[in-house]
Amino acid sequence: MDFRIENMTCGGCAKSVTKAIRSVDPAARVVTNPEARMVSVETTATAAALQEVLEEAGYPATAN
């Protein structure tokens, strides 16, 4: 699944986003693109669970 994260603007942000996603699913495959402000995730977690944890981390996400 793909998410747009408007305030993921650098590598540090991307690491925080990845850490947040892996707190829900440690086995998730996460590909971040800070320039495009996009993240692609292969996971067994629901989109809602990921959006919730990303919002808590300060990176509200919109599912694409």
Image: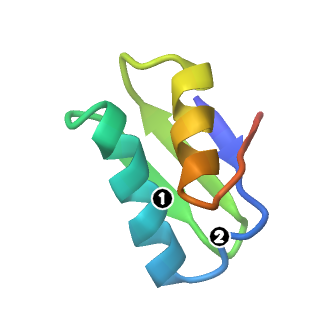
Q: Spatial distance from mark 2 to mark 1, Cα to Cα? A: 8 Å
How far across and how far down the image is residue 29, in percent? 32, 40
State the residue position of label 1.
17
**Placement of the C terminus among the 4 image quadrants:** top right
How far across and how far down the image is residue 49, in percent? 52, 25
Q: Residue at x 21, y 37 (%)?
A: 26
Q: Residue at x 42, y 19 (%)?
A: 45
Q: Residue at x 41, y 43 (%)?
A: 21
Q: Quick one: SS at disc 1?
A: helix
**Placement of the N terminus among the 4 image quadrants:** top right
Q: Quick one: SS at disc 2?
A: loop
Between discs 2 and 1, the one toward the N terminus: 2
- Amino acid under label 2? Met
State the residue position of label 2.
8
How far across and how far down the image is residue 56, in percent? 57, 49
Categorize mark 1 by other alpha carbons within 10 Å: few (<14), some (14-19), many (20+): many
Number of residue marks: 2
- Contact between labelled residues 1 and 2, with CB atoms less than 8 Å apart: yes
